[in-house]
Amino acid sequence: MRLDRFLANLPSYNRQQVRLMLAQRRVRVDGQATSDPLTEVREFSRVELDQQLLQAGRPARYLMLHKPAGCVSATQDPQHRTVLDLLPAALRGDLHIAGRLDFNTTGLMILTNDGQWSRRLTQPATKLPKHYLVETEDEIGEHYVAKFREGFYFAFEDLTTQPARLDILGPRQARLTIVEGRYHQVKRMFGHFDNKVVGLHRERMGAIHLDPGLAPGAFRELTADEIATV
Ligand code: URA
């Protein structure tokens, strides 16, 4: 919400008082004095007027987790352990997953309570590259590369996938970069060649790399620099 609306919604101030207090630069958002009525106030923003705290701001949280195989990308599941079960109870609170992975897929998983940020990370319009290491049952042919670049028609969604980059690393291993996150996307792409994906690991989302120091199941907070890349 814009700052002038936030202030005018408080019971104590009318619009004229709000205009004046802004002009006098008596309002601080996240520690910065501002006179701009359009300054964005979020649930995470700390807002002060002179020495008075108007909103403390909920702590925003951004975590990376090394997802192990055999756990569900969900906040709750009646049968299996979920990625949230890997976090201490005190941290789980209001976190959601930014970009799910299948049950046996491993690698970079990002969890946050900041919906605006996670939408930027995951919405197709952002075209954020996601990098996967793929192991397949059968050999990967050179002809795959052009098809991944050209796109695959997905009948269920009635769309053709965005150009993807396939780097063949070995007879049954490749690195794949895709800019979307359709349901089972990687498996369906290889499925076009009747080639089963037997190992899938997400290494990177945009500029955020899975920390090599994180063992499967371990997590850490994202750094301010990592958060700012999205
Ligand atoms: N594509 C898949 O098929 N599975 C995943 O877990 C991620 C991308």
Image (spheres, rainbow, N blue to C red):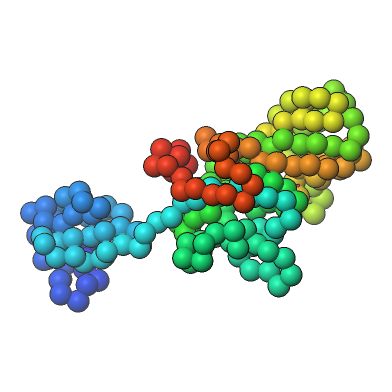
> Would residue 228 be found to the left or right of residue 132 on screen?
left
Q: Position of residue 122 (x, y in %)?
A: 57, 48
Q: Position of residue 213 (x, y in %)?
A: 55, 38
Q: Position of residue 52 (x, y in %)?
A: 14, 65
Along the line of sight, which residue is nearer the eye, 193 or 220? 220
Q: Is residue 114 visible?
A: yes
Q: Residue at x 81, y 25 (%)?
A: 170
Q: Position of residue 198 (x, y in %)?
A: 83, 43
Q: Residue at x 26, y 59 (%)?
A: 46
Quarter of the image for residue 142 reads top right
Q: Is residue 18 visible?
A: no
> Would residue 61 be found to the left or right of residue 195 on screen?
left
Q: In which quadrant of the rendered image does the N terminus lie?
A: bottom left
Q: Is residue 134 above or below residue 22?
A: above
Along the line of sight, which residue is nearer the eye, 83 or 189? 83
Along the line of sight, which residue is nearer the eye, 190 or 222? 222
Q: Residue at x 64, y 47 (%)?
A: 216
Along the line of sight, which residue is nearer the eye, 4 or 217? 217
> Would residue 227 be found to the left or right of residue 99 on screen?
left
